[in-house]
Image: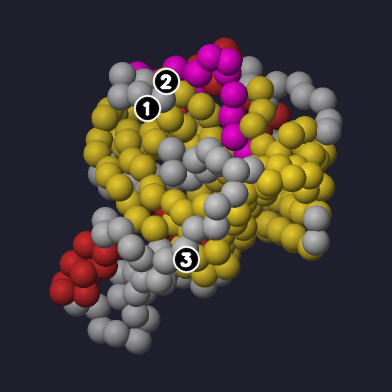
Amino acid sequence: MKREKELPFGKDIPFPIAEKPAFAALRRSLISMFKPGESIVRNARMVLVDLPVRRDKVAGILPLGLRPADPAMARLFVVSYERAAYCPPYNEASLSFFVRSPFGEGGHVAWMVVDDDTALILGRELLSCPKKMAVIRYHETGGRVTADVERKGTMLLSIDAEITGSEERPEFVLGAKAFNVGGPGQLFFFNPVWCFRLGEVIYESRTALGTLAIDHSLLDPLREYVADFDNPLPMRVVRMDINLLKYMFPVGLTGIAWFLRTYNMRFR
């Protein structure tokens, strides 16, 4: 694929750690998040795989107005953020359902874990991502990528992928439209649904063939929603920057019934 020029790295968000918190610094930081030309995440490396899901199960936990895509699919990824403007380097894993809505197609993050508490807090408070803490490992050596996620004594998932080729015109990874619940305006039982989109610059995207194992867990019930699949699976290995927040606006509201249906996945 064509090699993109790397963007300059942005200033610390919301302000440098040694700097006294001030409204001017916060204002500058918020403006920079919507300003193209600087990255807020540098050199993110990830392995991702698209999986079939159980349509009825997924439909049961989607907010009002969202419905599963056709075919019903989800994207699972494990990523290593080598440099971020808002916290030290950290790892993350996520399961996002492909959805349709009156505002177009996109993804709904149903489950996400990180291994840094600052990334957890900012992700839940600002981008309505249902982040929880976990032990996450990501290794990329030569033509092989291995990754796994362990939480509360259970090995939730593991990936072992061999790189097979390169992609000339890679599709979006994190730059697609997202419909997430919580974030600004959340009130535990009652949560807004936000539509937002991140900007991304993909420097390298490679095809891979790998094996995926997902274990059953009451606290992280991924296997409940992911349908049966056969290994090996087609995967992607990507290196990219995140460079801005393109837009973010509310599109709905969830209540107690939705809160109860998603409690294990989001809060335990």
Q: Nearer the viewer, mark 3 or mark 2?
A: 3
Q: Quadrant of the C terminus?
A: top right
Neighbor class of circle 1 (other Cα within 10 Å; few <14, some 14-19, many 20+) is few
Q: Is residue 219 magenta?
A: no
Neighbor class of circle 2 (other Cα within 10 Å; few <14, some 14-19, many 20+) is some
Which label belongs to residue 201? none
Does residue 61 appear in the picture of this structure? Answer: yes
Residue type at numbered disc 2: Arg
Give me the C-alpha separation between circle 1 and circle 3. Answer: 45 Å
The reply, left or right, for residue 264 in relation to residue 9 is right
The reply, left or right, for residue 263 in relation to residue 167 is left
Q: Residue at x 59, y 24 (%)?
A: 73
Q: Which residue is mark 2?
A: 100
Q: Residue at x 83, y 33 (%)?
A: 232
Task: Tell me, yes or no, whether the two marked residues, 3 and 2, touch with CB atoms within 8 Å.
Answer: no
Residue type at numbered disc 3: Glu
What element does badge 1 sit on? helix
Residue 164: image location, x then y, percent: 79, 44
Q: Which residue is mark 1?
A: 256
Residue 22: image location, x then y, percent: 19, 77
Q: Which residue is mark 3?
A: 6
Which residues are the magenta region?
A: 61-78
Looking at the rendered structure, the number of numbered marks drawn on it comes to 3
Q: Out of 115 and 147, give the one closest to the viewer.
A: 147
Give me the C-alpha separation between circle 1 and circle 2. Answer: 23 Å
The reply, left or right, for residue 50 in relation to residue 176 is right
Residue ranking furthest to the bottom:
18
